[in-house]
Image (cartoon, rainbow, N blue to C red):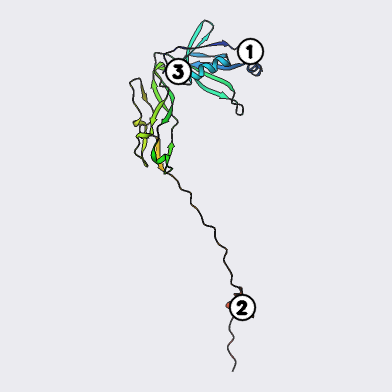
Amino acid sequence: MTATKLTLKAEKRTEVGNSAKKLRKENYVLGNIYGKGLESVAVKVLLPEYQKIYRQARGTHVVYLSVGDKEYPSLISNVQRHPITRDVLHVDFRKMDLKQKTETKVPVEIIGELAVVKTGEADLIVLLNEVTVECLPTEIPEKIIIDISKLEGIGSEVKISDLPKAKEYVFMDDESQVVVQVSEAKKEEIVAPVAEEEVAPAAEGTSEAPAAGGLADAKLEPKKE
């Protein structure tokens, strides 16, 4: 968590119609402020200022959006990016009541090494990249750290109930849910090529095995005396 107050200047967006493309060319990020009891406010933020704040805040620190003479303590959420260029197209700012606890997603970070994983004997499987916590907006943890060097080896796992506790927040996911597990590495089966069946050459003066309807299926006539 950071003690520094993160302030981001925004302007009300009054442009309508096909203005989005024009605003993005002018280096603006489009956004909306929403929240309980608040009518959605359309805003625009200069891209360099947004990027600077986002690097510090991500989705876990309160950002104070300054719009005219009003200030909205918010969390950055639902960042929309261009599928090819990855440019930021739109951002939602979720207005927070700083005195009310809220539920939010927090990323999981894996640290440390495990011998069986390092040697390739086992695979480390991360089933949850983020977990849900409940706390005051100003006390949201930046990340939840899991040190895999403390695990015992193949078959070991970390559940929600095993995550580090803190008085500032509580985990809201099912305690039995597995976050990380160590599984035996899957070995690729090597399938030997099937050799073509060798057919022995037929002896001179003889024929190959009879086809259907040949000698094997023929009726033997009784020998005439």
Q: Is residue 12 above or below residue 186?
A: above
Q: Residue at x 63, y 18 (%)?
A: 24
Report crowding for label 1: few under 14, some 14 to 19, many 20 or more residues within 10 A (C-alpha): few
Q: Amino acid at mark 2?
A: Ala
Q: Residue at x 51, y 16 (%)?
A: 53
* Residue bearing mark 3: 61
- The reply to whether the C-beta atoms of the residues labelled 1 and 3 are less than 8 Å apart is no
* Residue bearing mark 1: 15
Drawn side of residue 20 relative to residue 38, left or right? right
Q: Nearer the viewer, mark 1 or mark 3?
A: 3
* Residue bearing mark 2: 203
Report crowding for label 2: few under 14, some 14 to 19, many 20 or more residues within 10 A (C-alpha): few
Q: Amino acid at mark 3?
A: His
Q: Is residue 18 above or below residue 212?
A: above
The Cα atoms of the two marked residues, 1 and 3, are separated by 29 Å
Question: Where in the figure is residue 223, as x and y percent of width and height?
Answer: 58, 90
Drawn side of residue 180 relative to residue 211, left or right? left
Q: Residue at x 39, y 28 (%)?
A: 145
Q: Amino acid at mark 1?
A: Glu
Q: Nearer the viewer, mark 3 or mark 2?
A: 2
Badge 2 element: loop
First along the sequence among labels 1 and 3: 1
The Cα atoms of the two marked residues, 3 and 2, are separated by 88 Å
Question: Where in the figure is residue 195, as x and y percent of width and height?
Answer: 55, 62
Which residue ends up furthest to the top in the rendered image?
69
Query: Which of these two is toward me, 61 or 152?
Result: 152
Drawn side of residue 162 relative to residue 213, left or right? left
Q: Which mark is residue 225?
A: none
Badge 1 element: loop
Quadrant that contains the C terminus: bottom right
